[in-house]
Image: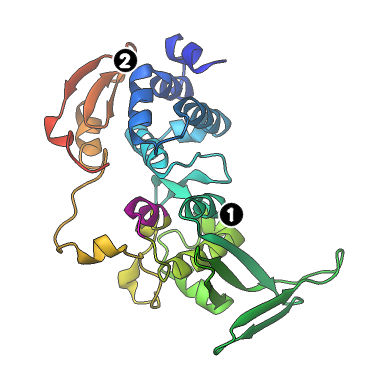
Amino acid sequence: MTSTDVATRAPRNNVEHVCSTIAKPEFKERIRAALPPGIDPDRFQRVVLTAIQQNPKLADGDRNQLYNQCLRAAADGLVPDGREGAFVEMGGKLTWMPMVGGIIKRLATAQINIDAQLVYENDDFEQTLGDDAAIHHKAPKLGKPRGKEIGVYAIARLPNGMIMREVMDREMIEQVRAVSRSGSNGPWKAWWGEMARKTVIRRLAKRLPILDPALAETITRDDEMYDFAAGNATEGDTAPATQAQQAAPSGPRRPRGLDSVAAAGNASQSPSQDVIEGELVDTSTGEVIEGDDTMADQDF
């Protein structure tokens, strides 16, 4: 079934209702506006629809949150295919989470090649520090047990040939997990290894010369997962800032996308209406009923 079929067919349940809204040309234009240049909005739209159809629970929660996270994924130039990223529930809230594959893909656009690997107790692992820094990692022969995870590391090669490394043992990873708002469930429970690799990449990325604010935002997209005020986060766990962000004046950050209107939309909308990027949309026709002009010039 094509996105056009989904958009024109009368919805019979939550999944069809959500998919029909996302498949409409009006929502597709919002996807197109959010995507970086060169990304096919049709493919992105198809992957989102597939993700919802494969995980119907996504359509059972706050629809405005789902639409908002779809547009955030588009802004990152990544798709929710379980490799580049995924929609996950954390603390009762649906969140777009870039995954290791997606972060590596985005860093590659800046000509930064990065990799992260888990270290197991039966691996041969050695880290050399000093002027001639290096990481030696050798796994056991195929078929031999590797044991439990004891650490993780990331290596980045910059365009100028410089190599940067970051190593974290399991205790350090657990310190980060401890300040996660969903440390005992969600992605930390389902994908501990994925989250460990992502954690060390995020820490290494803080030291990388990232000049693109959009790329820095992709890497730190899930900062809201963590309660850094809890006092358990160590230096390097907070968001990396680009040179432009470091020079910017301090002050309250404007809300992004639908965050400032979703709550109001939930309180007032009828069952056949959804708030999309500050506009009240009739999901049966795709017609914009009313818009919030104050949202028009806000950052996405």
Identify the residue position indicated by label 1 in the image.
Answer: 190
Q: Amino acid at mark 1?
A: Ala
Q: Going from the N terminus, do you reach mark 1 or mark 2 first?
A: 1
The overriding secondary structure of the stretch rendered in magenta is helix
What is the image's colouring?
rainbow
Residue 82 visible: yes
Q: Is residue 148 left or right of residue 179?
A: right
Identify the residue at image location x=50%, y=39%: 79
In what element is the residue under mark 1? helix
Of marks 1 and 2, the one in the foreground = 2
> In the rendered image, which quarter contains the C terminus?
top left
Residue 65 placement: quadrant? top left
Disc 2 residue type (three-letter): Gly
Residue drawn where x is 26% and y is 20% of the image: 281
What's drawn in magenta, residue-wise? 211-218
61 over 100 or under it: above or below:
above
Q: Quadrant of residue 227?
A: bottom left
**Spot occupied by residue 18 in the image (x, y as percentages of width and height):** 42, 24
On the image, numbered disc 2 is attached to which residue?
286
Rendering coords of residue 69 (x, y %): 38, 40
Residue appearing at x 15%, y 64% in the figure: 250
Image position, residue 33 (x, y; %): 33, 31
